[in-house]
Image (tube, rainbow, N blue to C red):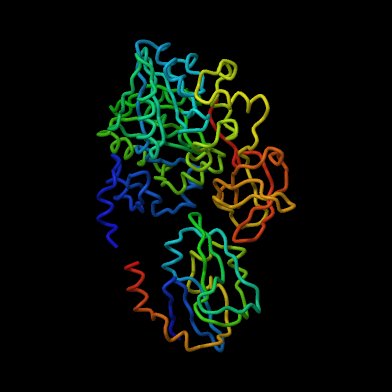
Amino acid sequence: MGTKNLSDTRKKTPLHALHQSLGAKMVPFAGYDMPVQYPLGVLKEHLHTRDKAGLFDVSHMGQAAIIADNHEAAAAALETLVPGEMQKLGVWRQRYTVLLNDDGGIIDDLMVSRPDVNGRLNIVVNAACKNKDYAHIEARLPDGARLERFDDRGLIALQGPKAAEVFAKHAPAAAEMKFMAVAPLTIAGIDVVVSRSGYTGEDGYEISVAGENTEKLATLLLGDPDVAAIGLGARDSLRLEAGLCLYGHDITSETSPVEGNIRFAIGKRRREEGGFPGAARIQKEIAEGPSRLRVGLKPEGRAPAREGADIQSVDGKTIGVVTSGGFGPTVGGPIAMGYVAAENATTGTDVQLIVRGKALPARVIDMPFAPHRYYRG
Amino acid sequence: MSVKYTNDHEYVRQDGDVYVIGISAHAAEQLGDVVFVELPVVGKTFSQGDDMAVVESVKAASDVYAPISGEVVEVNSAIVDEPAKVNEDAMGEAWFVKIKASNAAEIDKLMDEAAYKKFAENS
């Protein structure tokens, strides 16, 4: 079928050879050849991360920086593109926000962190969006600010209840970091920039490292008996259980951060002041409530409802659509998220999900489906 | 009694006067961890190729097609209660349904073990 030749055109992360040596099943993802699972399998990889610690290759994500003369200028420049509070972002702190289009729809979601270099804000964007994001940012950044890409850097996530213990063996200072703190550390002689964050709902770290040192660092961490390599399959079920959005599915260029139920991506001052793309729509939605909202859904039986399944009210009227859904290994059953009309978004509302032509009873429930276990000190 | 296979990775094997149907070990492996199985009710009749059951893994949902025509005489509710059995013993304990064939000649046209092995390797 020629798939072997096709894989040669896919981009490789610095951990590509390591994935292959670990027996990973590789799939195309966002233009990269990425591990969807290792021999452990998606289910056990998921449970291992919730029980001990999982190591994820997220080097395909886009690492870059907004650079200006000083913090005020860099923050002001980025604030023209995102609704997050950037002026007050502290040194070595990180924040989640979104790039917005002029209609208030989401171009991508991203992490922004502030190193101790005056006038620099580091960003991490989604792999599938990075070229689009960079073009948008470069086209829209005001004079005096510029984008610098770090395409050659690796990014590793270490996630799970044992992540802090494992990581502190190599970098004791990491144990003291609180959720969304960032720090420059040295591990086995390798310089890294570490944030206490992730996308699984667990405590853990995301570690930015020079491309040529990425495999050495990953191998060191994987040498710990509590750490297993985890593929994209489990990454997806972990983030779904944590109630976190997958860009292009749960949030898109059509949905606003208010509809997407990620209001924390919008700074308090900025809700009042506006000054970000689509501010009129977003301020109106905050004041009056959005017409639709992303909610958690718990199907009653065992059948998973997947992306695209219609959501109906109990009287059979279509009120929305599932945007992510599947089996939650920690929950032990099916879970989903999707958009419903605001009047149906109240926790406890009974709905039905249309799966293979059949209406399955389900209920609107609070997210996350599995409790967040971030370290807040 | 020899086992026969379809292009869609179902198997059929004769057991007395009924036929046992399931998904192949290769299919179970490709699907990954099975988390949901939906089976038809006893008494339902199918033509060869009809949607007969559903199997879902952590990755995706797949239809299971009737490899031969006939009437369902027994279903394996153990795999509905414990879908992971499909990964453990797809060819044995984790069969899906038993069928009374309405046209046993259909079985002759399916692949034998050797042909299926070759087919699975190349698919």
Relative to A194, residue A22 above or below: below
Residue drawn at x 59%, y 41% is A370
* Residue A373, x across and y down, in percent: 56, 34
* Residue A61, x across and y down, in percent: 37, 36
Residue A121 visible in rendering: yes
Q: Quadrant of residue A141?
A: top left
The furthest residue to the right: A315
Quadrant of the image containing the N terminus of chain A: bottom left
Residue closer to the observer: A184 or A132: A132
* Residue A20, x across and y down, in percent: 30, 50
* Residue A250, x across and y down, in percent: 53, 41
Give the left or right position of residue A205, taking residue A216 as reference: right
Residue closer to the observer: A103 or A197: A103
Number of numbered discs on residues? 0
Residue drawn at x 25%, y 34% is A212
Relative to B2, residue A99 above or below: above
Residue closer to the observer: B49 or B43: B49
Residue drawn at x 32%, y 40% is A219
Relative to A176, residue A362 above or below: below
Quadrant of the image containing the C terminus of chain A: top right
Residue A377 visible in rendering: no
Give the left or right position of residue B12, taking residue B118 as reference: right
Residue closer to the observer: B68 or A285: A285
Residue drawn at x 58%, y 55% is A304
